[in-house]
Image (tube, rainbow, N blue to C red):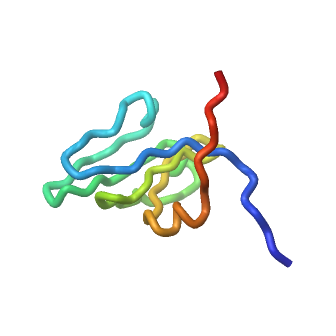
Amino acid sequence: MKFRKRLIVEAVQFQAGKTLDSKFIGTGDRVIYTEEGNVIIETLAGAQRGHRPMLARPGDWIIRDVRGGLYSMKSEIFEASYEAVEEEK
C-alpha cells in the first residue's frame, strides 16, 4: 500500500544568525541558540509525549505539527514531503 500526507502544517526554514519568530514558537516551547549556529528545540507538547529536544541546523525546516509540537526536518526531506499552499484569508 502507498500513503500520502494529507495535513497542512506551519513551517519556517531556520537560517544561521536569525532568530525564530516568537509567535511561531508558542508558549511553553523553548529554543536555545548554540554557539555553533544551530538551535535546540524543546517543546511542552514533546516533553509530555516523552520526546527529547531536537537539533536544527541552518537550512533545516522547523515544523509545528497538528498537536502543537515543534520538530525539525532536513530541507531535502521537507521539500520531498510538502508543497506550499495558499493561506486562507
Nearest the eye: 78 or 34: 78
Residue at the (24%, 42%) spot, across then down: 18
Nearest the eye: 58 or 30: 58
Q: x%, y% of residue 79?
A: 53, 62
Residue situated furthest top in the rendering: 89
Q: Quadrant of the N terminus?
A: bottom right
Q: Is residue 42 visible?
A: yes
Q: Is residue 47 visible?
A: no
Q: Is the residue 3 above or below the residue 12 in the image? A: below
State which quadrant residue 86 falls in: top right
Residue situated furthest left in the rendering: 35
Q: x%, y% of residue 59?
A: 34, 59
In the visual, does 29 lie left or right of 59?
right
Residue at the (47%, 61%) spot, across then down: 73
In the visual, does 2 lie left or right of 15?
right
Q: x%, y% of residue 61?
A: 43, 54
State which quadrant residue 66 falls in: top right
Residue at the (62%, 32%) spot, across then down: 87
In the visual, does 77 lie left or right of 19?
right
Q: Quadrant of the C terminus?
A: top right
Residue at the (54%, 45%) spot, across then down: 64
Residue situated furthest right in the rendering: 1
Q: x%, y% of residue 88?
A: 66, 27
State which quadrant residue 30 falls in: top left
Nearest the eye: 31 or 77: 77
In the visual, does 13 lie left or right of 85?
left
Count all numbered tags in the image, as a single digit.
0
Q: Is the residue 19 above or below the residue 16 in the image? A: above
